[in-house]
Image (cartoon, helix red, strand yellow):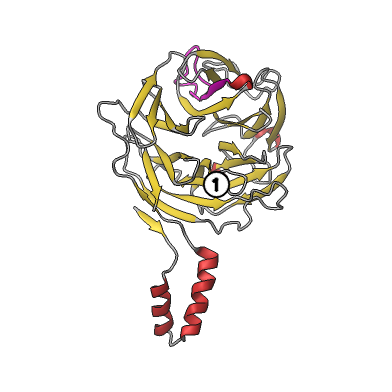
Amino acid sequence: MSVSVSLSTKGLFQAAARAGGSLIFALACFFVGATASAQEIYSEDKNFPEIGSFNLQNVSWMTLSPAGDQLYMVQRGPPAVSIWTLDGRLVSSWSTEWLGEPHSLTFQKAAQGKIFAWITDMAPPNTAGGAFGHCIKKFTPDGNYLGSIGVCGANSQGSGLDPVQFDKVTDVAFDGNGLMWVTDGDVGGLNNRVLSLDPETGKVLQVWSAPGNKAGSGPGQFNLPHAITTDRCNRVFVADALNNRVQIFEQNGRFLQQLQCFGTLGVYGLALGNDTATSAQLFVSSSTTTFTGAGNVQIFPVSTDCKAPLPVEKGCQGAANIAISLPQGTSGSALHNIAATRDGEAFFIAPLGGNLPPEKWIRN
């Protein structure tokens, strides 16, 4: 595993000397480089997590608790959801008969201080049972099933809007107004779209997609939208996986910006860290689409000015670019999802592809 860092002061002086340059030239290079490409450095916590006798089974997603002090892990095998301390100790877990192939977990802070956990049950037709797949399921934080949006079950997949129906639905987010945002469409699915909904009624309020929900590469069009999040300005960030980019929108659908800084890597994970009134960071995980285990985590400073023309003002000049090479699982491996602590001091990687442990990386 390697970490990308900016050139050191010593290195710049040596480069200048080799080129016959002067001290002034070296200093000028240093200050330009420091302004343009200074990098934060993260290293892996080799003691995370304390697996013990816990049965890892294809970890798909990790999400911080609403209070930010625990980590919820979703896997495709019992127990479906487990809760851990941030330093990697198992707190509790719960299994449920209501999940076939869970993909993501998102918390909703609802009225009267109520907290709900929404899990996308993405099971494709070949593994979907009578109550599994193509829907979003609502639970209490301790695992009691409360209902779903979309019809669940084999051959239930679709593109309908009234009532709404999904196909390989991937992720959910909630904005400051309580609206639900959904990415709908994984590999081989019918849809490549983003929707906003009323979480109480399931009514669709907006749909962003190319015509016919086909894969598209223009603004507001997607090719496997895989993850979604919102910031305190209610801007919507979408991991547009096979377009190798992140798209950013206003809540009304107005396109603001795209980050296309990931080469040929698929952009799979998004998380906001250090999201305060004065600073914010966008954590992005990208990975090879062939599950070779190679990928990157890149961190971008986000403007807290809600009227800023570009939410990520420096574009692709991120604060960090960490190269990560995962071990191979039983079916390869990929940086499938990322979660970040509230202060941005650490992030967590869910390595889909086999019975692989999640990883924690800490800022040095």
User: To which quarter of the image does residue 317 belong?
Assistant: bottom right
Horizontally, is 149 left or right of 140 in the view? right
Which sits in the foreground, 251 or 331? 251
Query: Closer to the camera, 191 or 246?
Result: 246
Residue at point 73% right, 48% down?
307
For the point 65% across and 25% down, which residue is it?
A: 159
Toward which corner of the image does residue 178 lie, by quadrant? top right
Amino acid on which the number 1 mark rests in the picture? Leu
Of 16 and 343, the residue lying toward us: 343
- Residue 126 lies in the magenta stretch: yes
Which span of residues is magenta-colored? 114-135
Numbered label tally:
1
Disc 1: CA contacts within 10 A as few (<14), some (14-19) or many (>=20): many
In this rendering, the answer to whether 349 lies above or below 93 is below
Which residue reaches farthest left?
A: 53
Horizontal arrangement in the rendering, residue 317 relative to residue 310 (left or right): left
Is residue 299 within the magenta segment?
A: no
Q: Is residue 222 visible?
A: no
* Residue 334 in which image quadrant: top left
Is residue 66 at least partly visible in the picture?
Answer: yes
How far across and down, in percent of the image, does residue 163 sit? 68, 18
The x and y percentages for residue 292 are: 38, 45
What secondary structure is found at the residue carrying circle 1? Answer: strand
- What's the residue at 50%, 82% (across, down)? 25
Q: List the residue tagged with mark 1.
A: 282
Horizontal and vertical percent position of residue 218: 67, 46
Query: Does 100 sit above or below residue 22?
Result: above
Residue beneath the point at 65% across and 50% down: 311
Where is residue 258 drawn, in percent x and y?
63, 50
Main SS class of the magenta portion in the image: loop
